[in-house]
Structure formats: C-alpha cells, structure tokens
Image: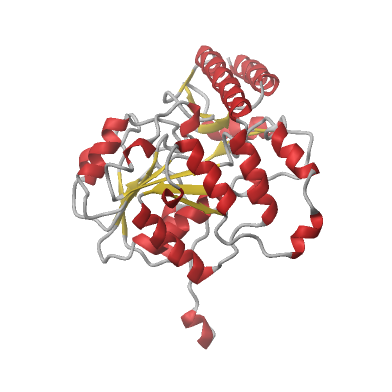
C-alpha cells in the first residue's frame, strides 16, 4: 500500500440497476416510469431560453420550492430540494446522523443506506423484517442515533400503515426519523400529514418514479422549519448551486400538471394489479406491492434461472444475490404492452419446464 492510501476513504459503492445501451429491450429493472413526463414539461423545454444558462441558477431553488409547498399545502420553509432523493438523503445523513449511537434501518431495504453510513462513518444496525417482510416496529423503540426506512419498502413494495410509522416517530423524540417515500404515490398514505405534529420527522420524495423524471434528478424533503434550515445550512456549506436551471423549470412544470400526474399513476396501478393476477396464475407469489414494481418468486423455478432466461429474451428485470431475497425478482411495472410480453414469455418458459 502506498503511504497516501492510508488516508483514502475506502467504501464499497452502491451498484445501480443496469442501463443497457441496446434500445431493443423491455427495461423493467430500474423502476423508471414507462410514460413520458407531463406535456407541460415538454412545453417548458421548448420555451427554455438557452442564453439564460450562462447565469448561475437560483441557489434557493425558489420557484420549485414554492410549487412543491403549494402542492402539499405546507410553507416554503418546510421544503428542501436536492439533486434526486439520493442527494437529499445523503445530505440528511450528513446533517442529522452525527451521534455515536447507531442509526437503524431494515435488513431488506434500499441498499444505498449502508453505503452512505459506511462512507460517512456512521454506525448502524439493520433490523430484520419479519417473515412476511414487514417492519417489526418494536425493533425501533430502542436507543439510536436516527432511523430511516422506505414506505413502501424497496425492494419488497410493501406498505406499512401510517399508524405504524407514527408510532415509530412518537417513540423516538430524541432522534430524527426519515421516511423515504419514493414510491408512495402508487398506493400509499404519506407521512407528510404528520410533520406539523412531530419536529423529528423528515419525509423524502422524488420526481424519478411517479413524475417520470429520473433523468432530471429532482428530490425533496418536507419537515419542520428547523430541520429544513439545518439541511440548507449544510447544503450552502457544500455547494450553493446544487440544481441546474433546466431541472428547476421542468420540475415546476411537472408539479403544476396535477391531472397528467394522476392519470399516469392510475395507469401504472391498473397495470400492476393486472400483472399480479397473471403472475399468480403462473405460480408466482409476492408481497402485496403498493409501488411501481412487483417482488416475485416462483413456486418451482429459481429466480436466477428466470432472470437469465428473461435477459436472453431482452427483458431486463432486477435480481439481488443477497440473503433472504436471492430467490426473488424485482419486476418494474411497464406499459400494458410490455407487461403482456413479459407474461407471454414466462407462460411459455414455465410450460416448457413441465
């Protein structure tokens, strides 16, 4: 080892879902929305004044903060915006998780949490989900340096009732509780309604899933004014211009088109429920997903075998070679046509195995 390497921060990085360059595929591996962003976003793109890009963007991200605040009927002081929810969560780890006590999160969950904790040298303990992949709320009633969990969870898609979420928040008045709601628009009840009741709650959401804007990298947190101020203080100490001008403009346009947003979400929910019935008919079982994906296992055929067979057919899904979940596939809900092709292939493949 070279002498300077002793001072290098060494981490095992997060591995994102594959982004294949081949366009002739059905891409159901990264939970992207199969539909385009709002037509109002397209209009905003066409009306963009390119000359304005020579100027720095608004460091307060004021117009987008205002649009999000209006949408959720909160004050602007309750909203923090960042470059995707990953950026918002990482900034929140840096801001709020500075205790010597371990932070807590589930053992089967978004696999970026332990990466951030390791990178920032934050102690942590994973809490096992029960045999049905639900949170065991009592596991979060002990001393800790902070708590984070997704609701609905990823990769399971399971939703915890808001009463469970509230009890965890209520039992941890000395810790920040972060609820990661990346998928909440597909069937969940948001904890945003609780921020006026609990000063230790931070709710994080994203434009990447339900708003079809993963490529723009827009995420946000909603919490009480004090939490948001602390986040902004850290942001301005790190990088004042975190979001570019186009992302701000297109984000505002998306928020303002409520009708399109609701229509798209309903289409995905309907396709998800149809796909569940079809997969069940083919011998799959899965938690009752309230996200834009299904976490499925087959009664006889190993998940890794199905993953490889689907890939040969140019249908990409996600396979996790991890304890407890290495016999499951996470299947993003695509268009009706894409899901029909998936079901057709699985039906033939399973039939040929008999």
- Residue 216 vs residue 11, the one in the foreground: 216
Which image quarter holds the C terminus?
top right
Q: Is any atom of residue 63 visible in this view?
A: yes
Q: Residue at x 24, y 45 (%)?
A: 140
Q: Tell which of 294 and 213 is nearer to you.
A: 213
Question: Which residue in the rendered view is the most extreme toward the bottom?
Answer: 3
Q: Is residue 233 left or right of residue 166?
A: right
The answer, for residue 136, to whether it is visible in the render is no
Q: Where is residue 301 in the image (x, y as percent from the top left)?
A: 52, 25
Q: Could you say which is closer to the camera, residue 260 or residue 104?
A: 260
Q: Quadrant of residue 101?
A: bottom left
Give the answer, above or below, for where 83 lies relative to 6.
Answer: above
Residue 215: x and y in percent read 67, 46
The colouring scheme, among rainbow, by chain, secondary structure or one colour, is secondary structure
User: From the viewer's perspective, is 150 left or right of 67?
Assistant: left
Give the side of residue 25 with respect to residue 143, left or right. right
* Residue 45 or residue 178, whichever sits in front: 45
* Residue 14 position within the rendered picture, expressed as x and y whole percent measured from the top left: 52, 55
Residue found at x 62% / y 20% = 346
Is 299 above or below relative to 83? Answer: above
Q: Where is residue 48 shown, x and y percent of the image?
A: 77, 48
Question: Residue at the spot x=79%, y=44% of the render?
Answer: 47
Q: In this rendering, is residue 39 above or below 13?
A: above
Q: How many marks?
A: 0
Q: Give the vertical position of 345 relative to 96 (above or below).
A: above
């Amino acid at each position: 080892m070279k002498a300077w390497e002793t001072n290098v921060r060494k981490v095992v990085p997060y591995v994102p879902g594959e982004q294949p360059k081949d366009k002739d595929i059905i891409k159901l591996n990264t939970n992207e929305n199969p539909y385009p962003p709002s037509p109002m976003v397209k209009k905003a793109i066409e009306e963009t004044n390119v000359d304005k890009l020579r100027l720095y963007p608004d460091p307060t991200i004021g117009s987008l903060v205002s649009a999000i605040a209006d949408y959720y009927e909160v004050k602007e002081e309750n909203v923090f915006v960042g470059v995707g929810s990953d950026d918002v969560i990482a900034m929140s780890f840096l801001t709020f998780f500075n205790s010597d006590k371990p932070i807590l999160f589930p053992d089967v969950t978004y696999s970026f949490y332990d990466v951030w904790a390791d990178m920032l040298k934050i102690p942590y303990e994973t809490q096992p989900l029960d045999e049905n992949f639900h949170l065991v709320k009592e596991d979060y009633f002990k001393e800790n340096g902070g708590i984070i969990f997704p609701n609905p969870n990823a990769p399971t898609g399971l939703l915890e009732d808001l009463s469970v979420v509230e009890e965890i928040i209520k039992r941890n008045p000395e810790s920040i509780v972060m609820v990661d709601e990346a998928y909440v628009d597909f069937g969940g009840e948001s904890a945003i309604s609780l921020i006026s009741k609990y000063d230790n709650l931070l709710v994080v959401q994203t434009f990447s899933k339900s708003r079809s804007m993963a490529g723009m990298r827009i995420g946000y947190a909603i919490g009480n004014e004090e939490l948001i101020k602390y986040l902004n203080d850290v942001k301005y100490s790190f990088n004042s211009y975190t979001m570019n001008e186009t992302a701000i403009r297109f984000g505002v346009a998306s928020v303002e088109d409520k009708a399109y947003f609701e229509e798209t979400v309903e289409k995905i929910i309907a396709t998800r429920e149809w796909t569940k019935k079809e997969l069940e008919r083919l011998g799959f079982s899965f938690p009752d997903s309230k996200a834009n994906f299904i976490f499925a296992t087959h009664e006889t055929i190993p998940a890794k075998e199905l993953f490889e067979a689907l890939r040969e057919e140019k249908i990409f899904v996600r396979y996790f070679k991890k304890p407890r979940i290495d016999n499951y596939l996470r299947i993003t809900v695509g268009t009706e046509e894409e899901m029909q092709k998936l079901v057709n292939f699985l039906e033939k493949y399973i039939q040929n195995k008999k």
